[in-house]
Amino acid sequence: MSRSRPEPVQIVKQRRDDALAALVARVPYIQYLGVSFDRRGDELTGVLGFQDKLIGNPLLPAIHGGVTAAFLEITSVITLSWTSQWDALEAGDPEGDAPQMRLPKTIDFTVDYLRSGLPRDAYARARITRAGRRYASVHVEGWQDNRSKLFAQATGHFLMPQQRRPDEQ
């Protein structure tokens, strides 16, 4: 019995990068804020590149609290979606379920503002604490210069989209 030859690493990386780009492109607000994602294997780090329009209080200056909350929520939703399509990607489906997949819906999202977000790039990483077919719980942390000095963290609960059957369109 002959074993199939594994795909070259570059093709696998490109397939993953394309699927992530397709997923992120589905949410226009992500482009408006300038959020991008750094992917290392199956782990995502959200990157909020600093822009003057993100400042809420010019006297401090500090990143607007709504921008901080949106950044953390975006990182949570994209991480949940990415995790749920990972198996399809690894099976060789070039787009995963990205075109058909609906995004998780936020049930509640609680943000703890720990310090002012300084006028520089911010990073966030979400950890899924519970994932079921209908419901998921996520904890997300945001930092700027030093990962051990968080400027915000949040906990969110999400309604997971029901997978469409092949006969549904």
Image: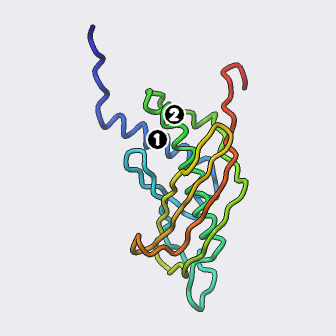
Q: Position of residue 123 (x, y in %)?
A: 47, 66
Q: Position of residue 8 (x, y in %)?
A: 29, 31
Q: Amino acid at mark 1?
A: Asp
| Residue position marked by numbered label 2 in the rendering | 95
Compared with residue 90, is residue 21 higher up or lower down, i.e. above or below? below
Compared with residue 51, is residue 43 higher up or lower down, i.e. above or below? above
Q: Quadrant of residue 69?
A: bottom right
Screen quadrant of the C terminus: top right
Find numbered disc 2 in the image and state the secondary structure of the residue it sits on. Answer: loop
**Residue furthest top in the image:** 1
Find numbered disc 1 in the image and state the secondary structure of the residue it sits on. Answer: helix
Query: Which residue occupies 66% across, 31% down?
Result: 163
Label 2 – label 1 distance at C-alpha: 7 Å
Q: Earlier in the sequence, mark 2 or mark 1?
A: 1
| Residue position marked by numbered label 1 in the rendering | 18
Q: Amino acid at mark 2?
A: Glu
Q: Position of residue 101 (x, y in %)?
A: 63, 37
Q: Position of residue 137 (x, y in %)?
A: 61, 51
Q: Quadrant of residue 56?
A: bottom right
